Image (tube, rainbow, N blue to C red):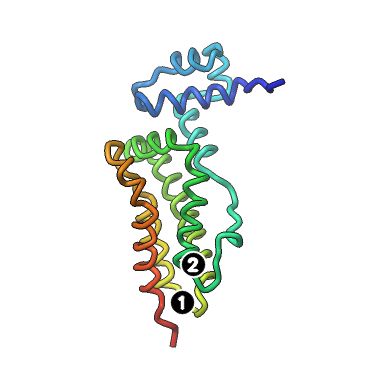
Amino acid sequence: MEKPIGARMRILDAAESLFAEHGFDATATSKVAALAAVPKGLLFYYFPTKFDLLRTLVDERLDFGPVDTEPLVEPGNPVRSLLNVTSKLYEIQRASDVLRVIIWREQRTHPEVGANLAEHRRQVQAIIERVLRSSFSHPVATARLRSAAQAWLAIVAMRPMPERAESQARDTTTGLAALAELICDGCRTELA
C-alpha cells in the first residue's frame, strides 16, 4: 500500500508547481491550498506567511545534502572526473527543474532566495574543486583550481533553451568533453 503524502509536503509540492508557473507574487495562497487539497488555515499553520512558504521551499529543496565525491574521481583523468561530477550533479538536480525556474525568477526580487542560490553555488563549486584536486596526478595551485571549478560551474549551470534542447542534447557529451579538456589544460602546469 502506498503511503499518503503528508499535508506539509503536498503544500510544498503545490507551491513549487504554482510559483514556477505563475511566479511567487502572482500566486495566491488560496490557490496553493486548493491544489494541495488542504484548508487555507492548515497552510498558514505550517507557513505563517507566503514568504515563509517560499523560504522553506528553497531551503529544503535546493539543498541536495552531502555528495560522496570519491566514486566520481578518476585519478590521473581530470576530464573524465569533471564529466562524472557533472553527470552526478545533473542526476541530483533533475528532480528540481521546476524549483530552478522559481529560483532564477525570484532571486532578484527576494534577496533570501538569491542568498540561498549563492550558497548552493558555493557548495557545488567546492564539490567540483574536490573532484578536480583528487583527479590530477600533480599538485595544482589553489587559485588555478578554484578558477577552473568556477569556470566549470558556469558551464554546467547553463541549460539549453527549450527550443534547442533536443539538438543540443545530442552534442552535450562531445561539447562538455571538449570544454572539460580546455579547463583541465589550464591546470596542467605543475607547481614549482
The picture places residue 100, in percent across and down from the top left corner, at 41, 38
Residue closest to the eye, 28 or 51: 28
Labels 1 and 2 touching (C-beta < 8 A): yes
What residue appears at the point 38 percent right and 35 percent down from the top-left corner? 101
Q: Residues within 10 Å of mark 2 (few under 14, many from 20)?
A: many
The answer to whether residue 46 is left or right of residue 112 is right
Give the SS element for disc 2: helix
Instruction: Say if 177 sits above or below 88 in the image.
Output: below
The picture places residue 181, in percent across and down from the top left corner, at 38, 67
Label 1 sits on what residue type?
Answer: Val
Instruction: Say if 29 sits above or below 107 in the image.
Output: above
Question: Residue furthest toward the bottom?
Answer: 192
What residue appears at the point 46 percent right and 77 percent down from the top-left corner? 140
What residue appears at the point 38 percent right and 41 percent down from the top-left corner? 111
Give the SS element for disc 1: loop
Label 2 sits on what residue type?
Answer: Leu
Q: Is the N terminus in the top left, top right, bottom left or bottom right quadrant?
A: top right
Residue position marked by numbered label 2 in the rendering: 132
Residue closest to the eye, 33 or 161: 161
Residue closest to the eye, 66 or 51: 66
Q: Is the C terminus in the top left, top right, bottom left or bottom right quadrant?
A: bottom left
Instruction: Say if 129 sits above or below 16 in the image.
Output: below
Structural distance between the alpha carbons of marks 1 and 2: 9 Å
The picture places residue 81, in percent across and down from the top left corner, at 50, 63
Q: Disc number at residue 81?
A: none
Question: Residue furthest toward the left?
Answer: 163
Residue position marked by numbered label 1 in the rendering: 140
The answer to whether residue 3 is left or right of residue 26 is right
Sequence-first disc among 1 and 2: 2
What residue appears at the point 60 percent right and 60 percent down from the top-left corner? 71
**What is the tally of numbered marks visible in this picture?**
2
